[in-house]
Amino acid sequence: MSITVDSELCSGCGACVASCPYGGIEVIDDKACITEDCNLCGACVEACTMDAIIWTKEEVGIEKVDLSQYKGVWVIAEHYKGNIHKVAYQLLGKGRELADTLHVSLTLVILGDAFDDQLEELSMYGADEIIYVKSKILKNYYSDLYTKTLTELITENKPEIVLIGATATGRDFAPRVAKRLNAGLTADCTGLEIDPKTNNLFQTRPTFGGNIMATIRTPNSRPQMATVRPGTFKKPEAKKRKVNIRQIDYDYSEKDSVTKIVKVINREKSKVNLEDAEIIVAGGRGVGKKENFKIIEELAEAIGAEIGGSRVTVELNWIPQDQQVGQTGKTVTPKLYIACGISGAIQHLVGMENSDIIVAINKDPSAPIFNVAHYGIVGDLHKVIPALIENIKKVKSAED
Amino acid sequence: MKIFTCIKQVPGVSEVKIDPKTNTLVRKGIPSITNPMDNNATELALSIKEKHGGEVIALSMGPPQAEEVLRQALAMGADEAYLLTDRAFAGADTLATSHTLGLAIKKILKDSGDEKKYLVICGTQAIDGDTAQVGPELAEELGLPQITYVQKCELKGDKIITERVFRSEETVIIESKLPALISVLKEVNDPRFPTMTGIVNAHEEMEVKYLNANDLKAGKENIGLTGSKTEVFKIFIPEKKGKHVVLEGSVEEMVQQLCNNLKEDKLL
Ligand SMILES: Cc1cc2nc3c(=O)[nH]c(=O)nc-3n(C[C@H](O)[C@H](O)[C@H](O)COP(=O)(O)OP(=O)(O)OC[C@H]3O[C@@H](n4cnc5c(N)ncnc54)[C@H](O)[C@@H]3O)c2cc1C
Ligand SMILES: Nc1ncnc2c1ncn2[C@@H]1O[C@H](COP(=O)(O)O)[C@@H](O)[C@H]1O
């Protein structure tokens, strides 16, 4: 297993150097050289236009899996307090698309208790089949019981693609299931597509803090598993469909789990629901102080928006934690995101850059937020926002 | 009791920048650092040791220069450090990484004859790959109960009691018998800074032990690139979507223009 450079063919153009995320290749004396840092990711092989980089993979007698045995797309639903997490609906939308491209069926898998009444409603989002594993104890989430049940179901039914929401729960059981199945798993994807040539699943995800995108595939094994970031895909329209429902009863008891849930502490549920908001007005350190957040509230009120903020504003206690947008906060995809006094650090951007329209108000013209903003206003927010509120009110009253 | 911490060397990611002219990564002078949450893992291991005794063993899989992050763990107070390094480990995805780390932990336990009660602590996720998969996959490799996204952890007898963050609305207290694996968030503690003596000791007195594929009796089909099921097909810089305009004029003019645009986009 190695990457080597054919120095006869290498033109020293440096395209490979630019493509390498690890600093594993350098041009020395007009020829590309592999360095100690090479991680054998193969990005340079792709990038080389001269076919000068050779990637040799040793065949070590790996047992070849018969890929054609695996058929169908599965979506695993997560739930909380009796409600299916919205990422499952989003995945059904995308899953339908993938299943149609592959001409296979789409299955929704639920592990839980008391979903009997919801199955009809759940049938309307694109699935051909629902597998409902019913067990009292599965009202709560148990890492090991999820793993055991899902591995058994997957081994028995052999789906080719398994999609899971990239929530704290999904990211807990998905790797464990993947490991038990000896399957590949791609984390926190933001793009899924079928390669028309091979029918492999192309799984695209941000890495290096969102600075680079990587497309991953799982060419020689099945199932192809991916966790998908909530908010990436849209929930499909509800439509009546004929759906085959399979209920499987398990009689797990608490003793069957190696871990024990001692207590569930509910934090205060917030009034705002950023993930579903159509318009968000968000404030950053540039707002200046807590009292100044009033002007953000006024703008939100005028335009009919929910309020969000950068991590700094949460740390300074200007807004509650569950209104934080970004890597360690919420991922939001509103139709309109107005960022006020936010610099646009990468950790903030990953949480909001998929918004349809982004407006940035910032007094520093070189603030990175302007790189993602569709409309940028360079100026002091304390002057711009009042003027904006005034104008919005005018537009709205003209409409009435 | 042995407490293992898994430490990854990563590029200091906040400094990975894109050259706007060539649209490529600027990597010059980016330092490699310890994955931040892995320092929290080491800190937790050390604080458990200080209260209950035991031995803190730091592990890292990576190229020879990853020795540096292990020296830092030793400087913080870890008792032993192992670097799993071999060309055959390169190109590993999380499946192959967790297998390799698992082999090393099994070997260390077996060689010491102290196999029963141990704890493995990982960071929840690394800032380069951001996968958060190695922890749970390592737990599966070792056949251990796992608790991820841990923001509080205490040892009581042969049990750990943890606080796991599920969602913004909910924290769950979960307990598990040892041996077990947990992966921690940065909220779990504030990592200590190594003392001067610690640093000198770690670099001059203590040893980072190297283990290669042979030492671990690793099968080629399960490690490195060959042991990986996922494959990087393409790496690219994300494109900007849509039009990007910086509005001009007086505040009044800019605001007017913005409102007109938003009206056109049917947002007002
Ligand atoms: C592991 C990790 C996770 C993180 N997760 C998140 C996350 O989830 N979400 C998040 O937001 N951050 C996150 N961060 C923090 C992030 O790196 C930034 O520190 C943070 O986003 C900056 O917030 P800010 O833009 O409000 O503040 P600053 O970066 O201080 O920017 C303030 C901006 O306001 C502008 N300004 C000042 N005064 C005015 C004025 N009067 N009018 C107009 N503009 C003005 C300034 O020009 C500046 O651009 C994370 C960091 C790390 C390391
Ligand atoms: N190469 C490695 N060597 C040691 N520990 C690792 C390695 N890769 C991942 N880990 C551990 O697994 C955690 C999660 O990493 P990841 O799955 O890459 O996000 C890290 O915080 C480390 O504790």
Image (cartoon, rainbow, N blue to C red):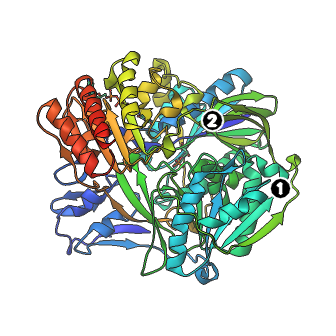
Three-letter amino acid code of the residue under disc 2: Glu
Quadrant of the snapshot with the N terminus of chain A: bottom left
Q: Is residue B239 visible?
A: yes
Mark 2 lies on a secondary structure that is loop
Q: Is residue B96 visible?
A: no
The mark found on residue A196 in the picture is none
Q: Which of A334 and B27 is in front in this view?
A: A334
Q: Mark 2 points at which residue?
A: B169
Q: Nearer the viewer, residue A2 or B21?
A: B21
Three-letter amino acid code of the residue under disc 1: Ser
Mark 1 lies on a secondary structure that is loop
- Compared with A223, A67 (above or below) is below
Query: Residue at the spot x=75%, y=63% of the render?
Result: A132
Q: Which of B260 and B206 is in front in this view?
A: B260
Q: Which chain carries label 2?
A: B
- Compared with A296, B212 (above or below) is below
- Compared with A25, A355 (above or below) is above
